[in-house]
Image (cartoon, helix red, strand yellow):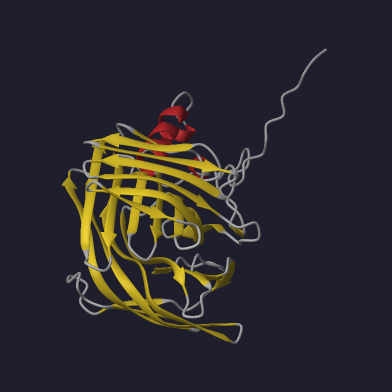
Amino acid sequence: MIRETVRAMPDLVQFSETAPRIAEWDHPLADPNLEDAAIVHKLAGLARVPGLGGLEAGYRKKFRHKSWQYMTACSDDVFVAFIVGTAGFAGNGFVYVVEPRTAAVASKFAITPLNRGTHLAASSASGQHRFEGSGLRIEIDNLDGGRRFHARAKTDGIALDLEFTSEPGDEHSAQCVPTPNGRWSYTHKFGALRVAGTISLGGRTIALTRERALGTVDFTKAYAQRHAVWKWIALAGRTRAGKVVGINLVDPTPEAAFSENAAWIDGKRHPLANVHLDVGQLDDPRSPWRLLADGLEIDMRAITHVEQKLDVPLVKHRLRHVVGAFSGSLVLAGERHELVDVVGIAEDNDTWW
């Protein structure tokens, strides 16, 4: 008997195609194979040369394709954020813990050359992301098709073991959009995860419970611009009336019929349009931020910040996360939601990679 193996169709770049599907979904994709898309780069011509196509593909996938998973968790007493990522030329891992009432910060940032000690799973729907280097270890297990995550991190003075879960009816956001210069980006985001577990900080243990702690996830794969600049907002908490709220905003927003800009109320996603993120003085991390969109007007008061910098041949990187308290209003479907000191992050990124 002859058995035929049927290959499952990938989610973004179909067999024999060179460009991904441009679309959006309410769930993370199992096989967002953006790395199989073709882009213009210095070695692109080798793809048409017999015997050299593999060299071109290896260079493109390893050095031009970027991927990361960034997550946050927040309760009344603590805000924590961590990442496992790769920029092709380097692996990136960090974890930081902020106590909003005192603005105390504990952090560890690490970058490894040529992705040493770094592994990114193909999607946020399954597999494990890992980073190990410079005394920092982070593991993120992607479970239940990207609706549950188990994260562990350990470094001097910080250890965390957290479970992130999504409610059955929650609407996640996943999309693939074009970006300038014939490139693309795929992202899966959700801003209303329930979080439970423990954070050990300087010998103390802080317990997080599903009833009080909320979190966010950002999984991204991108053929990014050589010079990438953006401002980004991610927060999860509760409105004045006690509803679960999450907000994700990016500026500038890629030109497409849809965007990642959204708010979640009790797990239901509401797209947001005409987003503008204004910073009083971009070079001053203490400066307030103002968030504007259709139906949204929020101000952020800076609590503290962390910063990562790298300046080596081929890579120049500056990432600043301002942890702040967000207050203002959000009007969705005629209903007004008030936010008072919801803690989240405002990101300022400027990278050559």
Tally the marks.
Answer: 0
Position in image of residue 75 (x %, y %): 39, 63
Closer to us: 80 or 32:
80
Q: Is residue 147 left or right of residue 109?
A: right
Closer to us: 223 or 186:
186
Vertical position of residue 339 compared to residue 216: above or below: below
Residue 293 seen by the camera:
no
Closer to us: 313 or 246:
246
Residue 208 sits in quarter: bottom left
Residue occupying the point 65% across, 60% down? 169
Residue occupying the point 24% across, 46% down? 203
Furthest residue toward right: 1
Position in image of residue 246 (x %, y %): 48, 68
Q: Is residue 285 left or right of residue 11?
A: left
Position in image of residue 63 (x %, y %): 35, 39
Residue occupying the point 57% across, 55% down? 166
Furthest residue toward top: 1
Position in image of residue 3 (x %, y %): 77, 18
Vertical position of residue 127 compared to residue 70: above or below: above
Q: Quadrant of the N terminus?
A: top right
